Amino acid sequence: MLYVTYSTPYLAIKLKEENGNWQITEPYFKEWANKQNISAGDIILEVDGNNINELNIIKYDPVIRVAKELTLEKQENGRLIHLQIAPLDIPEQLFYVFFLPACYYLLSLIVSLYLYKKQKNSSLLNLLILFILTVSLAYVSIGASGRLDRVGTVVNRSSMIFCLVLLIHFLRNYFLFLNLKWLFIYNIKIIYILPLIIVSSFSIFSIIYPFTNTLFSIFTLWLFFILLIIIFGILGIGYSKYKTPQLKFFLLSIISPFLPFLFLFAIPQIIFHKYILSAEICSLFLMLIPYSFIFTQLTERIFDMEYYITRFRHYFNFSFAFTVWLLIGLYWITDIAISRMTEIFFFSFLSLIALFYFKEKIDYHKRKILFSTKGDYIHRMYTTIDSIGRVVKIEDLLEKFVHEVALHLEINHIDVLTYDLQTQQITFLSKSKEYTQNQIDEVLLDKLCLGDIKKTEHFYIAFIHQDVNYKRILVVDHNKSIYLKDEELLWLELLLLYLNNFIENTKMVEDLLEQLKHMKEADNNQLPWLNKLLWLRFEEEKYQLAQELHDTILQEQLHIAREMDVVIHAKKTTNIQTKLSKVHDHMIASLNDLRGYCENLKPPLLDTLGLNAALEKLIQKVHKRAEFVLIYTIDRLYLEDERLNLMIYRLFQELLNNALKHSHANIVEIHLLEAKEGFEVNYFDDGIGCKMDEIILADSMGIRGMQERVRAFNGKFSINTNIGDGMSIRIKVNEREQTNSDGYNTYHRWPTPSKQLS
């Protein structure tokens, strides 16, 4: 295809017959035509040494597509002009139909080889590779098809339809892979008849009978239009019905590149027989297809594509508006020719998109120079959480929080009001400012919930934390002259959510340390290792919670805040309902994520439906992720101490998580068995195992955490494992056994249980 494109110069000179002569109506490459003194009205006499009337194709398709020699007669003076034309004489046609298609095909081939080597023997991936290569084949054959080369015509028309059929086939398999209902015909083999038989046969027929060439070109464009509408419908309905981000990715990154060809070339050519942009220029957008797959595969995070697509849309809107404004200015000031507008538009448009992208990247790397911590709210959130997270007492935590808020908001009068629910006494963290009774009532009478920040006559007030003894409220004195910006309020709201969690955790640690202190005084035994363990676990939990909330809920909330800001300041109210619906969907997704975290922190079924229902749900979740066969037994227990239910649930959770992450087992067994005065948990897997000494020396937090839970209830924990022999764990708890006087060592060997335990 590329050889044919390079070997014959493409002219595309339109003609009309006038008194037996073929006159030029419109040269395609106007700049080249002006240089060669070719103008509308000139008469073409010979093409490549042959009289033009001897060319049968001219009667049905009055266009000189290719020629190496031309003889024409000037309309004004009858002077004859003989032209010798080489491919390099018209660099535009080589750039659009030779150089760019060659680069595109090479890029598609590299992407396809990369995808094939990355994951072999996948029908989905094979269809995707075929789709990418077929699109590139359709693009690379544009030049040969435009020259009416026989092979090029058949290849171009067939591959145009074939790539869309492959895409429909891929989407059918992808819907089934995602467990979604397919929205089109299941027998995809039927539509393969279109490119392989119908279009190919019609293309060959048009070569034999040239007068049908235009008719079959329109037929191919109609078929392309119909298939593309079908694909749009499948993806659009599928995404609106299932809200799956993968479908949105395919809709935007695979279908969007076809839109310029559809709306700027195919539809105008079908309806008006005159295109807005040529097929060569519209096909440039196909470059987005392999680029998007490179981006996806290199990051290996398909859901991040939604973020990058959103950024691209942001760049697109700014660049498009400014480019149109620039072209209007250039046309008004310089009187530039309309024929040059398209080239200037695309050059300016793409240059502006690149400028916005690189500016953002550079701004991010130079953020410490370009932005202060006052303006960089994400950086401020990090630094504040890191600062207050180092404190271990509630009073110190509140003091540190007030200090950080005062520092970042640059407000002096910030305090924390603590209301004792038992004695109804009120204390302020700071003693430097006196408050009137009216001001105190102003703070207390406002009913606040977690995350609420309200502005009253004298203060900004916000809920911090409440337990059975105390209610704590943040008080920011605005002096009727200080107004917090939306970004500052959002930053403060998120910080209060973190602070609430920190206080809860700190309170638990303080209570536990107080109990341990009494234990030490009573038994005169020092437990520094337990203090250290609790401290480390507390810090680890705070860090993980902060990181999880920052990476998920915080980002979602910031995005929702930006969307709401756009809605609030929108001048046009026509699409308000649609925008609010979109924000609502984002809020629901954020709430679902938050619900997932809450379920992990506190299993909801444990208190409502009991231990057995909670364990069944946990096992069903593991089933979906596991690659091993899971055999389990759950006896119904009748325990007096309800805390044992949570302990059993956490043991199951830890054992199954270890099996998922580390065991590499084919079979995993876990059994909860009722005992005479308690229960037993027996676990076995046939995985890779490990050495017993390594477990003890590694001081694994997973094993150690299970040990401590069992030991806290005076239970027995025994483990047996070796390299290649899998792992077996036995846990036995006697609910009525009060003490463990023999100093039981939690590491004991015991015989491997039978695999038939069920």
Image (tube, rainbow, N blue to C red):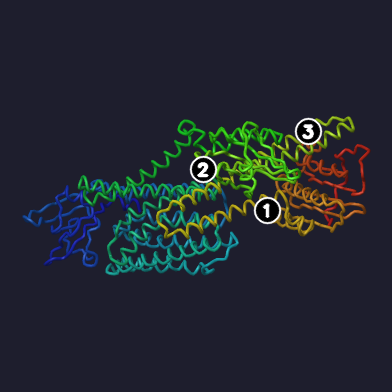
Decide which of 260, 723 is in the foreground and name it: 260
Q: Nearer the viewer, mark 3 or mark 2?
A: 2
Q: Which of the two labelled residues, at mark 1 and mark 2, occupies the earlier sequence position?
A: 2
- Give residue 73's position: percent from left, percent from top: 11, 56
Residue linked to disc 2: 487
Q: Is residue 546 visible?
A: no
Q: Nearer the viewer, mark 1 or mark 2?
A: 2
Q: Is residue 495 visible?
A: yes
Decide which of 232, 290 is in the foreground and name it: 232
Q: Is residue 448 left or right of residue 730?
A: left
1 and 2 marks in contact (CB < 8 Å):
no
Q: Which of the two labelled residues, at mark 1 and mark 3, occupies the earlier sequence position?
A: 3
Residue linked to disc 3: 531
Q: Is residue 25 left or right of residue 591?
A: left
Place residue 276 in its image quadrant.
bottom left
Sort mark 2 into few (<14), some (14-19) or many (20+) by Cα contacts within 10 Å. Answer: some
Place residue 438 in its image quadrant.
top right
Residue in view at x 31 percent, y 52 percent: 5
Decide which of 245, 417 is in the foreground and name it: 417
Residue in view at x 42 percent, y 38 percent: 359
- Mark number displayed over residue 625: 1
Quarter of the picture containing the N terminus is bottom left
Number of numbered discs visible in the structure rendering:
3
